Amino acid sequence: MGDLASGAGWGWPVNSRKCHFFEQGIALCGKWMFFGAKVDNQSKTKSIDDCVACSRKLDSRTVVKAKKTKVNEGITGVNL
C-alpha cells in the first residue's frame, strides 16, 4: 500500500459509499479528493462497490491506450 499522491489507484474515502479510482488525488468521476492509502493497483478486479463513473472512465482510457498501441505498432512496421 502506498499513498495516492505518488500514483494512480483505487481508494476508499471515509464518507464515500463507493470505491473510487484516483489520479493525483482526484477521482476520475470528479466528485472526490483523497490522499490516503490505495486499496489496490490498477489491475483490481471489478466490484459492485466501485464507482460506476470511475470504472467507465478507466475502461475508456484502457481502450484508447490499446488502440494507440496498435496504431504505433503499424507505423513502426513500415519501411521508409
Image (spheres, helix red, strand yellow):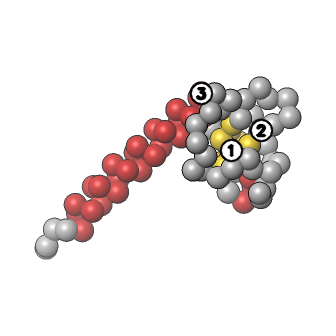
Q: Gap between marks 1 and 3, in whole Å?
A: 13 Å
Q: Amino acid at mark 2?
A: Trp
Q: For residue 3, which quarter of the picture?
A: bottom right
In the image, residue 15 sits, relative to residue 12, either above or below, namely above
Q: Nearer the viewer, residue 72 or 59?
A: 59
Residue at the image point whose x is 79% and y is 29% from the top:
16
Contact check, label 1 and label 2, Cβ < 8 Å: yes
Write down the residue under mark 1: 10
Q: Position of residue 18 (x, y in %)?
A: 72, 29
Contact check, label 1 and label 3, Cβ < 8 Å: no
- Is tag 2's residue or tag 3's residue first in the polypeptide sequence? 2
Residue 29 seen in render: no
Write down the residue under mark 3: 52
Within-10-Å neighbours for mark 3: few <14, some 14–19, many 20+: some
Write down the residue under mark 2: 12
Residue at the image point whose x is 33% and y is 49% from the top:
67
Q: Amino acid at mark 3?
A: Val
Secondary structure under badge 3? helix
Within-10-Å neighbours for mark 2: few <14, some 14–19, many 20+: many
Q: Is residue 49 left or right of residue 35?
A: left
The quarter in which the C terminus is drawn is bottom left
